[in-house]
Image (tube, rainbow, N blue to C red):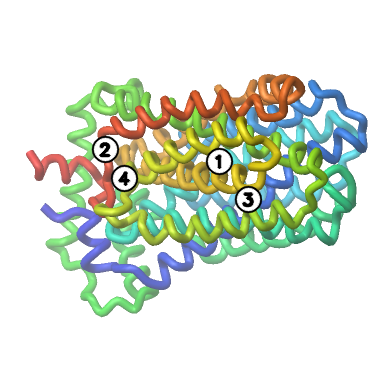
Amino acid sequence: MISFDQILEEKIGSGIYQLRTVSIIGLIEFCDGVEYVFMSILMAILQKEWQLSQTQVATLGSSFLGGVVIGNCICAYITDKIGRKTSFSIFAGLSVILVYYTSFAQSYNEIIILRLLFGIVFGTTSPLGYVFITEVAVAKYRGRFAFSLTLMYVAGKAYLIFLCFFFLDDYTSGNWRGLIRFNGIPVLLCFILSILYLKETIRYYLNKGQYTVAFQEIEEVQKQNNSSKEALNESEKDGLIAWQLRQNNLMIKENLNEENGVLSKQHLRITLQLWTLLILANFQNLSIYLLMPFLFAQENSGFEHMLYLFLIEFVFAFVIYLFIDDPKYGGRVNIIIYASILLVITNLLLYIYQASFLFVGMLLIKIATRGMFSTLFIICCESYPLHLRSRGSGLAMAVGKVVSIPSPYVLFPLFAIDPYLPFLILSVLGTLMIALSITYPSDRTQKHLEIYSDEQKEE
């Protein structure tokens, strides 16, 4: 039986359509990278400028994380209702407003609310971007297309640090208002491009039963990609409709409905392992972004050290990009296993050697967490069928963030006892990540996205 994955490979192919989609989605990832680093630096600046207490600084970080959880839930439920493109454009536009409003904030309470709202935007657009890309890319290059978002995210972090040389004096002072205003330019550009050029995914139209629209979109995409393939004939259209109806029937037959969804018997193990991995990965990632500015300030390090970190991280992220679609040497599950092992070793060495290992340790942890997060995002999208993809991905990321919301209240007291004590705890937790990675039951590297048809064939 014909499937959309076959149509994508044999009739549509890869070309301008995918590159345009990746470019626009990648631009918001670039802006998310800028915002995430800005958040950590802003906490250090405001602590000194506004004389904030340790609890207030922790609340500042937690408000952003709380917003991310809400955003993940929005992605999980709303985007399946109103569509990927509509959701993306709405939150890109909201991001523009928030950027410029933040630059005029005068009180701690205003910043708390704005951080919460920024978290909502970040929490919606981040998983949505990966859902978008996995639905438009062919199986052979799906990992690379999705991982290219990571390259843009890392590039955004390096870009922010580069601007810090011009806007900030050090990690605790400078013109942070001017910095965030300047960063509003790429956000505004992304919003405009999403309105003008971003298209809804064809899979979304098929799932909604809007077959005429889906067929029109296929013809448009064929033209954009300059495809030499013939347009769909009536037999292929009927086959694609039958395939979609079959997906729906199998969903009902296996009780994969809204009531049990990602926690149904078929998906329960994958869901619980993903949730646990993302909880641990988020805790590791937050330890870096919350503590890194304070650790560098403590060692009197300049912005150049953080810039070097992000530039080298970009290089290693590109290496992962080259291997993520290689089922022999790379593959999704192998990458999270490698990353988990590296985190255990590096965190332990960082606790033992402390300041003398700070730069190298931070670099290795950032490389590992970047590979871990980006690959887990791809795995989330590939582990669920279309009707659960946004929900499964959004909920997994939300659960990971929910548990990590109190982490600033844990990390900062530990930091006060010993700045490197958090890394000992993270090394111990990393052993659990290794076990979960090794036993993960599904790796869809270079396999068709809609898993029902594949599994049926295998049976």
Tell me whether the residue at label 4 lies in contact with that at label 1, contact meaning CB atoms closer than 8 angstroms: no
Tell me whether the residue at label 4 lies in contact with that at label 2, contact meaning CB atoms closer than 8 angstroms: no
Say whether disc 4 or disc 2 marks the residue closer to the N-terminus.
4
Q: Residue 2, image x and y in percent?
A: 14, 55
- Amino acid bearing label 1: Thr
Q: Element at badge 4? A: helix
> In the drawing, what numbered circle is on residue 124?
1
Q: Residue at x 23, y 61 (%)?
A: 7
Q: Nearer the viewer, mark 3 or mark 1?
A: 3
> In the drawing, what numbered circle is on residue 49?
none
Mark 3–mark 2 Cα distance, whole angstroms, equals 29 Å
Mark 4–mark 2 Cα distance, whole angstroms, equals 24 Å
- Amino acid bearing label 4: Asn
- Amino acid bearing label 2: Ser
Q: Element at badge 3? A: helix
Judge whether residue 76 can be spotted in this image: yes
Which residue corresponds to mark 3? 33
Mark 3 closeness class: few <14, some 14–19, many ≥20 residues within 10 Å: many
Q: Element at badge 1? A: helix
Say whether disc 3 or disc 4 marks the residue closer to the N-terminus.
3
Mark 2 closeness class: few <14, some 14–19, many ≥20 residues within 10 Å: few
Give the camera-side residue of 456 and 29. 29
Mark 1 closeness class: few <14, some 14–19, many ≥20 residues within 10 Å: many
Which residue corresponds to mark 2? 442
Which residue corresponds to mark 4? 207
Q: Is residue 102 left or right of residue 15?
A: right
Q: Nearer the viewer, mark 4 or mark 2?
A: 2
Q: Residue 208, image x and y in percent?
A: 34, 44
Q: Element at badge 2? A: loop
Give the camera-side residue of 84 and 282. 282
